[in-house]
């Protein structure tokens, strides 16, 4: 059965609007251009999807033009892929892509760089342009990308709905004796059948003590009669991620787990309640830790307690700005999307992570998916 996607792909018109905003920033800061590498930012601005290799392929954005920088033998492949129309500049195998970029840019001005490009691209550019003509473009890119458009939010919502449905199906087949690897394969297949390109982007299935390891244990596991179950998975729709975690048991009666689960849910709700427009991202992390402190958990990153940040931004990258972490003074604004997952870890016992995501509107926070109902009822 294929999932019926109720939303459209990002349009060329929206990508042109993104480029216009980037060009305005370049002009405002007196910058000669922005070099986009084979990263999600290349997809964000141009629609072109390319995976990094030792050969540079990307785009040069100037205040007045867009150029694709492409190995000559890859041009025919690029021309078959979705991308905004622009001039394609080729370089041959014995040539330097950095030299081509330098010639195109000219003899003056600062080039800002996609902050997710590999270091060896930077080194090649530094040889051609000098380090004084290179600058970190991350703040400019991230300032644009962290504010999602209605179309982006709709795509994320579609991906979240799809993955939540897959979570429900996975819960329905769980029974003692099932292997984690079998459930991972089941979840991947269901994601594919529902229309997520590439199936699961990731899948963590942990049972029992392994749930106390935030990103899972090595090797396979078999579900025991009274094990805690943690399932964390996601997929992509038109490049936009879902990412949902549920932690539960199949039957009631474990008071230690149920009490801890209630604390986790209280902390998750505290993050949501703290998500006010204009609030610093750090204050949401503070809100989660304040709940844990009431129950003598922590403090800080001490265990038992919360060993990592309370959340991360999400979009074309599964982890991106804004990060819900101490020290992040970024103010929440409409269009920001981020996870809410203040995990509680009890070492050598179990861990509980309830992960749902929030998007900010002009009226405040909204859930992409409704939080879990109870320790044996993972769905609202």
Image: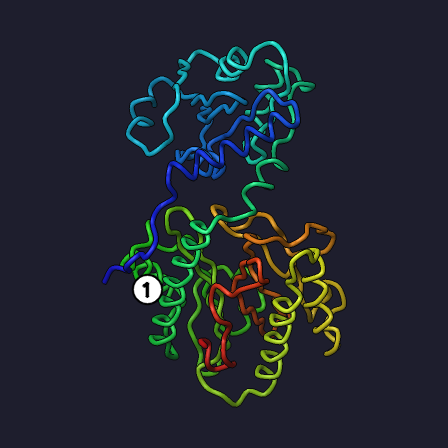
Q: Which residue is mark 1?
A: 186
Q: Nearer the viewer, residue 236 or 154?
A: 154
In percent of the image, x 47 and y 39: which residue is there?
40
In percent of width and height, residue 144 lies at 56, 41
In percent of width and height, residue 73 lies at 33, 19
The quarter of the picture where residue 307 lies is bottom right
In percent of width and height, residue 72 lies at 36, 17
Image quadrant occupied by the N terminus: bottom left
In percent of the image, x 59 and y 13: which residue is there?
128
| In the image: residue 260, left or right of residue 356 | right
| In the image: residue 320, left or right of residue 165 | right
Q: Secondary structure at mark 1?
A: helix
In percent of the image, x 55 and y 36: which residue is there?
116
Res. 198 in view? no
Numbered label tally: 1
The quarter of the picture where residue 344 lies is bottom right
Q: Residues within 10 Å of mark 1 (few under 14, many from 20)?
A: some
Res. 293 in view? yes
Residue 377, compared with residue 132, is above or below; it is below
């Amino acid at each position: 059965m294929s999932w019926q996607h109720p939303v459209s792909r990002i349009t060329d018109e929206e990508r042109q609007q993104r480029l216009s905003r980037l060009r305005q920033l370049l002009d405002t800061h007196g910058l000669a251009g922005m070099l986009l590498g084979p990263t999600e930012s290349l997809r964000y601005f141009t629609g072109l999807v390319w995976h990094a290799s030792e050969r540079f392929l990307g785009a040069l954005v100037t205040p007045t033009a867009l150029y694709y920088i492409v190995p000559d033998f890859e041009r025919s492949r690029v021309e078959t892929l979705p991308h905004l129309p622009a001039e394609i500049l080729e370089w041959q195998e014995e040539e330097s892509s950095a030299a081509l970029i330098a010639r195109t840019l000219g003899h003056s001005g600062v080039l800002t760089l996609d902050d997710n490009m590999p270091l060896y691209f930077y080194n090649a550019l530094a040889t051609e342009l000098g380090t004084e003509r290179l600058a970190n473009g991350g703040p400019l890119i991230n300032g644009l990308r962290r504010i999602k458009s209605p179309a982006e939010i709709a795509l994320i919502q579609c991906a979240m709905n799809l993955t939540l449905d897959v979570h429900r199906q996975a819960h329905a087949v769980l029974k003692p004796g099932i292997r984690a690897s079998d459930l991972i394969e089941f979840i991947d297949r269901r994601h594919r059948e529902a229309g997520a390109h590439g199936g699961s982007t990731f899948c963590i299935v942990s049972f029992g003590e392994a749930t106390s390891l935030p990103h899972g244990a090595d090797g396979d596991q078999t579900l025991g009669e009274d094990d805690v179950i943690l399932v964390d998975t996601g997929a992509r729709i038109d490049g936009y991620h879902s990412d949902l975690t549920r932690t539960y048991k199949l039957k009631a009666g474990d008071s230690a787990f149920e009490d801890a689960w209630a604390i986790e849910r209280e902390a998750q709700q505290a993050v949501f309640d703290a998500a006010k427009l204009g609030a610093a991202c750090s204050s949401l992390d503070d809100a989660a830790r304040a709940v844990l402190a009431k129950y003598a958990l922590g403090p800080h990153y001490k265990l038992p307690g919360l060993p990592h940040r309370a959340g991360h931004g999400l979009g074309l990258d599964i982890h991106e700005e804004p990060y819900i972490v101490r020290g992040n003074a970024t103010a929440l604004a409409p269009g920001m999307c981020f996870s809410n997952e203040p995990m509680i870890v009890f070492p050598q016992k179990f861990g509980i992570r309830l992960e749902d995501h929030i998007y900010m509107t002009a009226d405040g926070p909204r859930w992409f998916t409704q939080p879990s109902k109870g320790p044996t009822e993972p769905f609202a």
